[in-house]
Amino acid sequence: MATGSLTIDLDALARNWTELDRASAQGVETGAVVKADGYGLGAARVARTLVKAGARRFFVAIAEEGATIRAALGRGPEICVFSGHMPGDADMIGDLDLVPMLNSVEQLTRHMEALPGHPFGIQLDTGMNRLGMEPAEWAAVRDIALKAGPRLIMSHLACSDEDTTGFNEKQLTCFREMTEGTGVPRSLAATGGILLGPDYHFEVTRPGVGLYGGRPFTDPAPVVALSLPVIQSREVEPGESIGYGCTWTAEERRTVATVAAGYADGILRYLTNRGTLWFDGHPCPILGRVSMDLITADITDLPRTPDALDLLGPDQGVDEVADAAQTIGYEVLTNLGARYARRYTGGAGS
Ligand SMILES: *Cc1c(COP(=O)(O)O)cnc(C)c1O
């Protein structure tokens, strides 16, 4: 079989949720962000596992993702939609009991007209200039919105994992000013915000990437392993080159393995001559360009040609791959391709 195999450890996922839950102050509810198909790992399996771990509130980017989560979980758990109430969403929000995080006066009006009495939350912009009501806008509709009883008021931090200018504190102050005295549960922290400490936790936290084993969560349980089958191997003599564009030329005799995966499987082409595949603790540098369906790697130092090489696993996590590709773990995860054979382990039958 010439497809890579992607193994997702649901027990590790549950452990990461529990660790992030423990990292929050007592009495703080830990939610779970399962947008973008559970960061590429399969939203339904992820959500069912996290319900068993204790999560009761889920966050998605768009209503359609909320529909997938509702189908997987049934009634009960709360599903919040970051993009709020968009035109055409009313049926889905109403029928599937989704909670839109309303981002503007326009969305608030749309929601109250289309689904009067239906739950909603409010998203405030505290400086990121991306989503949510700004202070003046919020001040104008605050009384009307509060009278209708929002389930949650939230905002999002721009620099929780790399603050060098005190921006987190500015946003924290802004969030406090905008929400003081509302009596409504509040949420400001994603994974990075949880790690900033209890000032940032409020009543509900929203970890995403940390659940899936990514930074800034330190020492996460590794959730994803990706193993790529070797199709063939060959000796490359000094002066010979490898792959499209002949971007790598051998100075000495090397043994090169060709594995069955490429950029069509979400392995970033930027890993060309930069990334590393692994076999049982041994690094196998990628030689030549990552092509659509194939990657070539140096296995000269291995005692024999292995059946497969690993991109993700105990030797290399999503963040190491991201560093080599000059991106972030989030992008490595959400790029994981559809062509892999997916296998879920653990999770006690979820
Ligand atoms: C994606 C997202 C999260 C989760 O962030 P992580 O950094 O993955 O923990 C939380 N809140 C909002 C608004 C988001 O867009």
Image: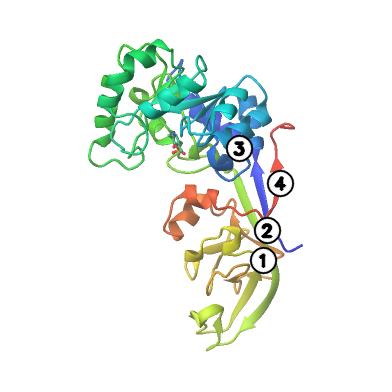
Q: Which residue is at the far bottom? A: 239
Residue wearing tag 2: 4
Label 2 residue near ligand 1, CB within 8 Å: no
Q: CA distance from mark 2 to mark 1?
A: 7 Å
In space, the residues marked 2 and 4 are separated at their CA atoms by 11 Å
> Looking at the image, which residue is at 41% across and 24% down?
108
Quick check: marks 1 and 3 in contact, CB under 8 Å? no
The picture places residue 45, in percent across and down from the top left corner, at 66, 36
Pick whichever of labels 2 and 1 is earlier in the sequence: 2
Q: Where ligand 1 lies, by quadrant?
A: top left
Q: Which residue is mark 4?
A: 343
Q: Quadrant of residue 191?
A: top left
Give the residue pinned by disc 1.
Answer: 260
Disc with the residue nearer the chain's start (4 vs 1):
1
Front residue (pair 300, 228):
228
The x and y percentages for residue 146 are 38, 13
* Dot 1 or dot 3, earlier in sequence: 3
Element type at mark 3: helix
Camera-side residue of 181 and 232: 181
Of the pair 281 and 78, the residue shown nearer to us = 78
Residue tagged by mark 3?
12
Q: Alpha-carbon neighbours of circle 3 within 10 Å: few (<14), some, or many (≥20)?
A: many
Say whether mark 1 is within 8 Å of ligand 1: no
Q: CA distance from mark 3 to mark 2?
A: 21 Å
Give the percent coordinates (x, y) of residue 37: 59, 41
Which is more toward the observer, 280 or 109? 109
**Given the image, on which type of amino acid does mark 3 rest?**
Ala
Q: Nearer the viewer, mark 3 or mark 2?
A: 2
